[in-house]
Every structure is written in structure tokens, then in C-alpha cells.
Image (cartoon, rainbow, N blue to C red):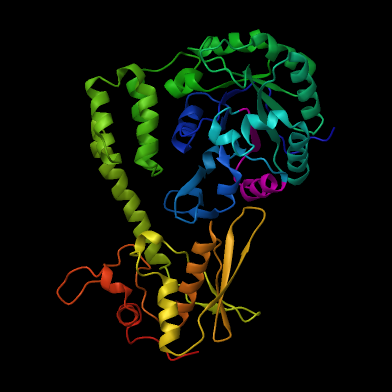
Amino acid sequence: MIVNSLSLCYHNKLILAPMVRVGTLPMRLLALDYGADIVYCEELIDLKMLQCKRVVNEALSTVDFVAPDDRVVFRTCEREQSRVVFQMGTSDAERALAVAKLVENDVAGIDVNMGCPKEYSTKGGMGAALLSDPDKIEKILSTLVKGTRRPVTCKIRLLPSLEDTLSLVKRIERTGIAAIAVHGRKREERPQHPVSCEAIKAIAETLSIPVIANGGSHDHIQKYLDIEDFRQATAASSVMVARAAMWNPSVFLKEGPRPLEEVMQKYIRYAVQYDNHHTNTKYCLCQMLREQLESPQGRLLHAAQSSQEICEAFGLGAFYKETTRELEARRAQLLARSPEETEEPAEDTSGVIKMAVKFDRRAYSPQITPKMCLLEWCRREKLAQPVYETVQRPMDRLFCSVVTVAEQKYQSTLWDKSKKLAEQAAAIVCLRSQGLPRVGWVRRAPPCTSASGRPLTKTLGTPQLRSQLCLGSSARSPL
């Protein structure tokens, strides 16, 4: 059996479980502070990650994986690099490996979610849906073990029979994974159902790789000593804690959990320091408050609509102002050191003019789009109408379009999620290369108005007027 040589040790560890919307950077760092040895990020879908670009965020000292809409999908930092495990949702071996290669330099391990029973995961053939397809499980894990430099693990649930479960885990072990996490419930069972310590124990006694026991928060785990009791009851190498850690991450402390208000304030400090989105911060704090949501502080949290208001609800208003002031100063220094330059279209060796640009439909009125502007410009210049050729990339199902105008091809280097959006992006490249105005290219662009100041809506259907609005007189001469 070949096991990845750069293995993160999974023996005798306390582990923060992967939890959707909870396992973001502030929670992971907090869990490490309180004694967790390994922390898992929330499950991130392969198709979403393959759209991301790796960005070094010097202002925050983080590495960010940023989606085309500029949303941070995964953020990590040096402090957790040797202890964070990246969990993905996938149903395809090639996509799984592509994601692993994307993140492997910034994480300590790669995990595949094979236990989530929620529809958002199973409907794509991911999560617990994989349990009914052992061949696919074997292909995904074998591909990852052979193709990535990081240790590979998976997280499963129990099958209907113990015999089938043991048969599956033995097959999984043969792929060469470093460890396996077992949630001691079946796919259809929920937290109110008792966790099967006996089934986890049978798995642990069958396999030679570390078995990580999971699922004990409801019945077993309230403090550190309970974690050890759960480990012994399951004969597991390590224990993975989910909801008990979500309610109070200091559950990992040998000395016992810290007061909740202290824990929440520490969480908020991390959230502000690492520019966590306020909706995610608020969600995690609400999970901690639980039955105290109707308390005065709970009501303040419920009403908060920004990170600043969250901080003020917990007496951290001054901390928020000072931290954001320092962050803005660092960003200003970085901008002054290396000012951003506007990207201009560039022609590659194949003669296609390319630039990195995407179409944001929110920046346009329905009556004016880049394709419409380009068509009107071609008519005005007595050119043949634009011709679009669009292809779809099988791995992530994204689209790229090339538009041909007067025998010159134009293309955006950024792939998009639909054929229509890809065509709009190609049109933007062509318009930009001709020096045409950037109508609607940024969200702050003002709406088109008539001479009286009224918004132009129905009248925008007139080709001549659209030409005047979208093209103006600053366009270059025809190609």
C-alpha cells in the first residue's frame, strides 16, 4: 500500500470537523487557540474552486482563492498552513485532482466529503451519494493519492449494514489514503439519532490506518474529558468534533470550556482582523448563542447589519475602528508601492486579441449590453455583424467565446458559467480594443438619461439613440 510520504499525522488528534458556513478562517484559528490539533475547512465544491484564482493578500497576510465575482471562497494563513485540511465536494476524479493541485501548497491535507446527506451535496453525486458507488470512490481517492503531494483522507457515513460498511472501508484503505473519518450514523439519520460507537469501533479494529470518530456531539461531548471518553468508546485513533465545537470552540481545552462571551469576543477579533464577511460572522455567533438569542445581547446581534455593529454589540467598537484603520493604511501603502494598472487588450501569437474581463449584468440596464453596443457599432461602420464561436470546457463546464469582427478575433481570458455571459465578455474585449466608452463596465456607472434628466428606458430601443449613447464619438476608426 502506497501512502503519500508527506503525511500529516492523524494519530491521537483533536480535530475541528468540516462545517458549512462555520469552518471559515476565524473559527479555525480559534479552535487552534483552544487546543485543536487539526482543523478542516468547510466543504467547498470542486466546480466552484476551479473558477477561483489564487491571490496573495498582502494586506491581510493571507492566501485567498477568489471567485470571478471577487468573492473569497477560501482564505487561509501561514499560522494554520501545517494543520488545515481542505475538504472538497466532488464526484469526478479529474476535477478533484485539479482542485488538490490548486490548493496543495497552502494546506496540510486534502479530504473528500463522502458523508454529507444534504441535498445540495447529494444532488450533484457528491457527499453521501458517493457511498452507493464504490468504483467512483476508488477512482477519486486513487487519483488524488497518486497525483497530490498532500495526504488524502475521506469522511464517510455508515452503510445500511455493518458488513457492507466494513467491505467499503477496506476497499477505501487500499487506495492508499492516510486516514478515514467516520460519522457514526447512516445517511438517513440525523443528530437526534444515537451515534453508533460500536460500528466505528468495528471499523477501527478492521483497518490499519487511523480512524477518526465523528458524531458524538449530541450524546457524548460537552467538555474535553468527554472527547477522550468518546475516543475510547469507539477505539478510534482520533476524534473529530463538529457541533460541540461550533457551540463553544473552547471545548478542546483540557482545563474546561471558557465563558461563552469571552470566546465570542475572541472570535469577533479574528473575524475583523481577517476581514471576514459580516454575514458569516453573524451566523457563527448565532450558533454560539443558541438559546440566548432572545437575550438583550442576542437581539443586538440579530439587528446588526455590519461588522462594526456586531463589534459594538459586544463592546468592541473601539477595536473595530482601530483595526480597520490599520488595515486601510496597509492597503494604501500597498497601492502606493505598486499602483494598479488598467489592463489593455493584448494580441497573442495566434492573432487573437485577449484581455481578462467579465460581464456583470448588474452593471447594465436590460436594454444596453456589450453585444448590442458592438452590433450597433458594426452597423454604423458598415461592417458585417459580429460572429461568436463558443466552446465549453468539460472539466468545470465553463464557457469561453471568441467574437470575430472584420476578420479580427477577440476573446476574454476569463471563462464564464454560461454561453451568453461568455459572448458578452468577448464583446467587451472588442469594444475596449476599439477605444469605445466603458458604458456599464463598472457598477458605479450612472444610468443613461435623456436631456431632461429622465432615465431612458423604452427609447433605448432606437438603434440611432443606442449608437449615440453607447458609442459616442471617441471610437477608433474601423478595423
74 relative to 187 in the view: left or right: left
In the displayed structure, 368 sits above or below 1; it is below
Q: Position of residue 32 (x, y in %)?
A: 51, 29
In the displayed structure, 358 sits above or below 284; it is below
199 relative to 408 in the view: left or right: right
Q: Residue 393 falls in which quadrant of the image?
A: bottom right
Work out whether residue 367 or residue 43 is closer to the camera in this orientation and state it. Answer: 367
Work out whether residue 152 or residue 82 is closer to the camera in this orientation and state it. Answer: 152
Whether residue 98 appears in magenta in the rendering, the answer is yes
Find the magenta span and give its range: 94-115
Q: Position of residue 301 (x, y in %)?
A: 27, 30
- Residue drawn at x 49%, y 62% is 421
Work out whether residue 41 or residue 96 is closer to the camera in this orientation and state it. Answer: 96
348 relative to 376 in the view: left or right: right
Would residue 411 be seen by someone viewing this image from the given angle? yes
- Residue drawn at x 61%, y 41% is 107
- Residue drawn at x 51%, y 68% is 423
Q: Position of residue 205 (x, y in %)?
A: 77, 14
Q: Position of residue 377 (x, y in %)?
A: 41, 83
Q: Residue 203 falls in which quadrant of the image?
A: top right
